[in-house]
Amino acid sequence: MSVDQQTVDFSVKPTLTGERVVLRPFVDEDVAAFEVTLADPEVVRLTGSPPDNRFDVERLRAWYGSRNAQTDRLDLAVVDRASGACVGEVVLYEWDRHNRSCTFRTLIGPAGRDRGLGTEAVRLVVGYGFERLGLHRISLEVFAFNPRARRVYEKVGFVAEGVLRQVLRDGDEWVDATVMSILAAEWAAHRGRP
């Protein structure tokens, strides 16, 4: 059966294994990792979260406890294979069935930074989106003050499409966001590149 004929099924929550990371459905123990990650000042800033935004354990438990039951999105934990620790998440959401497209976001906490875990996690979930779900387009937005994330997206094959001007207030400054996307044909041509 060709990918075009497949029925997209976001209710299936796969486990995807790479050299450095495993992407898997959430488990209760992941909440502790997200408590730490979502309190990290760098994560708060790079995700555009309000600085005073606090997540209590029960709210996090309810959110992550409901991710595996979602049928219109794919949320997976990013686990560092070396330590076995949950270090973040990858998410395909805002699924448009007719246009076979969705939006992507990722969050990697302090324990997962600067070791290539994020790049591998992005490659795994984007590959799954195109090769298994039959998506045509995956898009994202990245803030101008996050060049590290932009480099990851470019390495995976995302292409800048335009700029959303002054979408986020960062202290006394306004920050732009770049809209990026990758198409199925671009993924097919790019997937084997380092």
Image: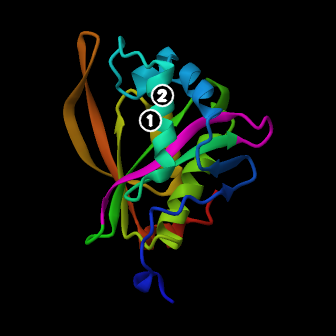
Give the x, y percent position of residue 103: 35, 52
Query: Is residue 107 shown above or below 136?
Result: above
Q: Find residue 117 and report its horizontal and vertical position in percent.
A: 65, 41
181 inside magenta stretch = no
Q: Residues within 10 Å of mark 1 (few under 14, many from 20)?
A: few
Residue at x 30% of width, y 68% of height: 97
Q: Amino acid at mark 1?
A: Trp
- In the orientation shown, which residue stands out farthest toward the left? 165
Q: Main secondary structure of the magenta part?
A: strand
Q: Residue at x 41, y 20 (%)?
A: 45
* Quarter of the picture holding the C terminus: bottom right
- In the rendered image, which residue does mark 1 sit on? 63
Q: Is residue 12 above or below residue 147?
A: below
The circle drawn on residue 175 is: none
Kind of residue at badge 2: Leu
Q: Secondary structure at mark 2?
A: helix
The percent position of residue 1, horizontal first and vertical second, equals 51, 89
Residue at the (21%, 39%) spot, across then down? 164
| Residue highlighted by disc 2 | 60
Residue closest to the eye, 139 or 38: 38
Q: Secondary structure at mark 1?
A: helix
The residue range painted magenta reads: 80-96
Give neighbour class at mark 2: few <14, some 14-19, many 20+ (Cα, 10 Å).
some
Q: Residue furthest right?
A: 82
- The answer to which image quadrant residue 46 occupies is top left
Tell me which residue sits at (45%, 41%) in the image: 150
- Examine the structure image and report whether residue 90 is included in the region drawn in magenta: yes
